[in-house]
Amino acid sequence: MSLGEFDIIARYFARKSGRSDVLLGVGDDAAVLDTHAGRKLVVAMDTVVEGVHFPPETDAADIGYRALAVNLSDIAAMGAEPAWMTLSLSLPRASEQWLNGFAGGLFELADDYKVALVGGDTVRGPLVITVQIAGWVESDAWLTRSGARPGDLLFVSGIPGEAAAGLAVIQRRILGGEAAAFLRHRFLRPRPRIELGRQLRTVATAAMDVSDGLLTDLKKLCAASGVGAQLNVDLLPESAAMRELFEAEDGLQYALAGGDDYELLFTLPADRAAAVVSSLQLQQRVTQIGVITADTDVVCLRNGQPFRIKRAGYDHFAAGQ
Ligand code: ADP
Ligand code: MG
């Protein structure tokens, strides 16, 4: 049976949100949402394209989960609480099995963070998914990329590189039991660091999420803040799964230049960093990996010596990507 546009929306996406601030959701010409005085609305959008952001054979549930996760990661990087999303879905065909899986993955993560799907658009075309996400911060304290100051300590959550290693495992069909499965999962199901972002909101001087590669994204944070950084490669957290399946040098390349981690990169004032870190309630590790400097260079050090990597990070429009 083939599904029409109306059936797709009604069957898979018009769903009770359970949020009292959704006054009008899917089904009308637009959504109406309740806002609150004093809160500041935080809005972000990310698109994922088959063959660019995920391999064509990716399971529909993973695509749905990931399309929301990459957006929630931006909300996390702002220190905001997520609330609502809209979904633009371009589909080559209306397969019930695919839609079932996709909606299952999307709502699995949406339910974890009580995010309501309040509208969207459904068209036929290449497989392209855009999610727009909105949330809020309670006061005039939100995280930016631009607040890092010389002397601040530089931290990253989780283990950078595992997602890129996971993509390599998928693309090269690397067999490797549990370690391979773990890394695949890190690529397919990135866990947005919402809880960490919420705790950093009033204490971090700067934050961003790592989507294009640690070094490339660090350069963006430094440029926004008008500072530089020394990243100490020896401090990067080691991944047991990566060590099992990849050479150390490849692992380092993934950690510094691989994208898709969706971890948080953030800075803390040096005199308060230790107290802040020990007060955090963490679901993943955070590691100090460097320091912010007054000059505007971003340098990697290994054993105290300058260290250069082969490829810097992902840029959709750079030559040779
Ligand atoms: P219109 O033509 O007036 O824009 P649509 O037929 O595109 O209306 O959409 C009808 C309703 O379904 C709207 O509320 C829209 O927000 C919602 N909608 C359409 N596609 C999606 C989707 N993929 N996810 C969630 N809501 C959707
Ligand atoms: Mg429409």
Image (tube, rainbow, N blue to C red):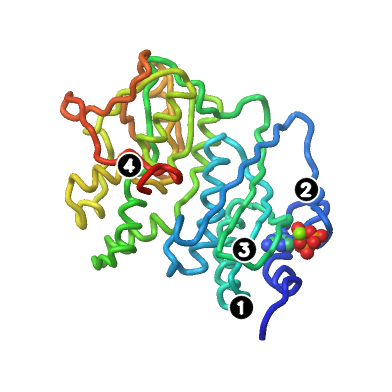
Quadrant in which the N terminus appears? bottom right
Q: Quick one: 297 or 101, which is closer to the camera? A: 297
The answer to whether marks 4 and 3 mark residues whose Cβ atoms lie closer than 8 Å is no
Residue 273 position by quadrant = top left
Q: Which residue is mark 3?
A: 90
**Percent x, y of residue 20:** 78, 51
Q: Position of residue 112 (x, y in %)?
A: 58, 55
Label located before the other in sequence (1 or 3): 3
The residue pinned by badge 4 equals: 257
Instruction: Answer whether labels 2 and 3 touch (C-beta < 8 Å).
Output: no
Q: Badge 2 is on which residue?
A: 21
Residue sitting at x 54%, y 41%? 74
Tell me which numbered mark, 2 or 1, is placed earlier along the sequence.
Answer: 2
For ligand 2, give the image quadrant. bottom right
- Say which residue appears at 33% left-offset and 25% top-offset: 298
- Which mark, residue 96? 1
Any mark on residue 15, and which?
none
Residue behind label 1 places its C-beta within 8 angstroms of ligand 1: no
Q: Secondary structure at mark 2?
A: loop
Label 2 – label 3 distance at C-alpha? 28 Å
Mark 2: amino acid: Asp
